[in-house]
Image (cartoon, rainbow, N blue to C red):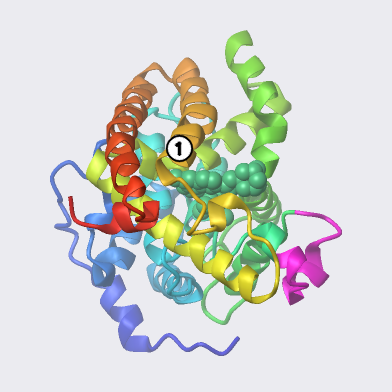
Amino acid sequence: YHMQVNQQDVLDVTMCPSEHEVPGFSLFNFTPRKILWKESPCFVIEMMKDLGFIDTFRIKIDTLARFVLYVKKGYREVPYHNWQHAFSVAHFAYLALKNFQLVEKGYLSKLEALAYFVSCLCHDIDHRGTTNSFQQQSNSVLASLYSSEGSVMERHHLSQTICTLNTEGCNFLDSLSHDDYVKCLDLIKDMILATDLASHYKIHAKQLNMAQEGFNKTNAQHRYYLASLLMTCADLSDQTKDWTETKKVAQLIYAEFFAQGDLEKKMGKEPANMMDREKASIPDHQLEFLRQCCVCIFKILATIFPSAKVLVNAIKQNILCWESSKRIFDKYCVEGKTSYEVLTSEE
Ligand SMILES: Cc1nc2ccc(C(=O)N[C@]34C[C@H]5C[C@H](C[C@H](C5)C3)C4)cc2n2c(-c3ccccc3Cl)nnc12
Ligand SMILES: [Mg+2]
Ligand SMILES: [Zn+2]
């Protein structure tokens, strides 16, 4: 683990001009993918300053800058699960913290808010663009390490996060009290493991129940369900943006899925339909995913935070767009094009 981040890079980030006043930056319809890759580390620092973390936790900026640069280097150049995804997920955490006033209204403690933001930034570190089931199928090193506990990739992302914190000059949490430090790492563990979508499906009913009963701040289970919900919403936040963004993100996700499918075919394995570029019907699969998974999760969020209603509406809008683009897909697919060719062709 000897990737070097040079001192000049660290200085550039610590000196980032605070006039990063990008109009609409803290609104739900802002698309963080438009932030320049080179400037993104500065924006991470700006968001943490704006959220009050620097003062509350006496964070040294140059240590934080080095941590952020190592985390950014820790992401691979895969189509979807790259640094840009991490940055966009952390940006949603920033939006949620500000717009739902999660700390001000007592939903999260300041320490939980810090853990939430950091977990979003780190939740997919060193992702290879392949799924947990692929780790088992291919008997990867990560599977041999973690498959007995499940959530193979997520356990690896957590391990990479801890390793980065323990890298020389990167532990920006070292001014926390011992108890707060242990508590923070515990929270980061729960939050990163919560991003395994298979785990989300297991607690979805309980989260719905919690929202209907009414969130109880003194109930530890409720706090755990809310933290998990906030992680899943951040991870899926691309789906709450406008159609152009949603379509662009779908191209990246399926580029990853189909690359895995191609690999599985080479390994003599039969890929799942959603991974097979010859069989997948992208609009159908996306309509199912948005209707079965996304809308439900953001409706629970909107039950607790009424201002999240706009996010549910954005997803419903994207469902309509997938339905109308499905008609176009069906026409072209009759002519023998695969749905990926249609998705990536300029309309
Ligand atoms: C737009 C969009 N579509 C997506 C369609 C499908 C799936 C997906 O993993 N489905 C499942 C379906 C069942 C039960 C579990 C395990 C497996 C079997 C595979 C989940 C994810 C999708 N996804 C994600 C995303 C979120 C978290 C981790 C990885 C990813 Cl890729 N982020 N955006 C999207
Ligand atoms: Mg993940
Ligand atoms: Zn993710």
- Furthest toward the right, the residue is 148
- Give the image location of residue 137, x and y in percent: 75, 66
Residue in the picture at 33% in, 58% down: 341
Counting other residues with Cα less than 10 Å from the Cα at mark 1, is it few (<14), some (14-19), or many (20 or more)?
few
Quadrant position of the N terminus in the picture: bottom right
Q: Is residue 46 visible?
A: no
Residue in the picture at 44% in, 33% down: 287
> Dot 1 corresponds to which residue?
284
Residue 68 placement: quadrant: bottom left
- Give the image location of residue 289, x and y in percent: 50, 36
Answer left or right for 233 relative to 215: left
Q: Is residue 79 above or below residue 237?
A: below
Q: Nearer the viewer, residue 332 or 229?
A: 332
Answer left or right for 173 relative to 318: right
Q: Is residue 119 above or below residue 267?
A: above
The stretch drawn in magenta includes residue 302: no
- Give the image location of residue 20, x and y in percent: 17, 56
Q: Nearer the viewer, residue 281 or 34?
A: 281
Answer left or right for 257 relative to 101: right
- Give the image location of residue 209, x and y in percent: 66, 15
Residue in the picture at 56% in, 44% down: 111
What's under tag 1, amino acid-wise? Asp
Q: Is residue 218 above or below residue 244?
A: above
Residue stretch in magenta? 135-150
